[in-house]
Image (cartoon, grey):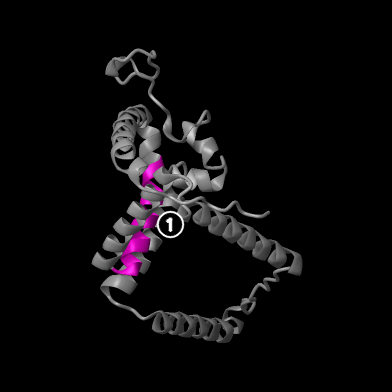
Amino acid sequence: MVPHSLSDSSSDDDRTTIKLFRRHRSVHKLLGGRKVADVLLWRNRNLSAGILAGATLVWFLFDVVEYNIVTLLCHIALLGILLLFIWSNAAPLFDRPPPQIPEIIVSEHAFREIVLTIYYKLAHFVSTLYDIACGKDLKKFLSVTGSLWILAVVGDACSFTTLLYVGFLCVLTVPALYERYEAEVDHLISKGGEDLNKFYKKVDSNVLNKIPRGPVKAKVH
């Protein structure tokens, strides 16, 4: 059985198992504790399965059948117009009301809130990327550059649609699997993190500390 807490001794079996993201809440609470968390953790299996089936259908149409986005939208519009035409003309024959299209109005306030949220998120992302690019934290710098290189290799090997689908598939399956095998995953990540820190310390002392670096200008807020 995987240990949940360990002492501070030097033995590998007595080290502390660190929870993923150093969290103190459940996975459901960490994901917001609402409908999105229920979908990601498959609390509502029918809805989660329906979303996964829809994403799989979209991926199949664009990547396997090689449907063009313009062609697909036109076909959907044609099908909608045809169904409305049949419904409108057949409704009087069966004493049914004609179809009513709901009018969806997005308020100016809601639109401004969305734009401001996107702006602040983008500004925070650019600021974080600037700090990493300046080399203030070499560990983050190496992690980001390595991740970008791996992503570039993966992106060259598969299409953008497949990459999005794989990412969506991971989002819809990894949280549920982690919640089910939480103790085992935390234990493996804890041991892997210790090995990675040891490797980084060796690289830092033998290579990175010998690289001359100039002073980094502080940002003006």
Q: Quadrant of the C terminus?
A: bottom right
Residue ranking furthest to the left: 157
Q: Seen in the image, is 107 located left or right of residue 184? A: right
Q: Which residues lie in the magenta part?
A: 159-175
Q: Residue drawn at (37%, 59%), measured in percent from left and top? A: 53
Q: Is residue 66 above or below residue 15?
A: below
Q: Work out whether residue 192 or residue 209 is closer to the camera in this orientation and state it.
A: 209
Q: In the rendered image, which residue does mark 1 sit on?
A: 51
For the stretch drawn in magenta, what is the main secondary structure? helix
Residue 155 location, x and y as percent? Answer: 30, 65
**174 drawn magenta:** yes
Q: Residue drawn at (68%, 73%), measured in percent from left and top? A: 103
Query: Which of the 4 quarters of the picture holds residue 182?
Result: top left
Residue 190 location, x and y as percent? Answer: 35, 29
| SS label for mark 1 | helix
Q: Is residue 185 above or below residue 168?
A: above
Marks counted in the figure total 1
**71 drawn magenta:** no
Q: Seen in the image, is 170 located left or right of residue 116? A: left
Q: Residue drawn at (36%, 30%), measured in percent from left and top? A: 186
User: Mark 1 is on which residue type?
Assistant: Ile
Q: Seen in the image, is 1 located left or right of residue 38? A: left
Q: Is residue 95 above or below residue 205?
A: below
Q: Is residue 206 above or below residue 57?
A: above
Crowd around label 1: few <14 · some 14–19 · many ≥20 (10 Å): some
Q: Work out whether residue 190 or residue 89 is closer to the camera in this orientation and state it.
A: 190
Q: Work out whether residue 185 or residue 93 is closer to the camera in this orientation and state it.
A: 185
Q: Seen in the image, is 30 located left or right of residue 163? A: right
Q: Quadrant of the N terminus?
A: top left
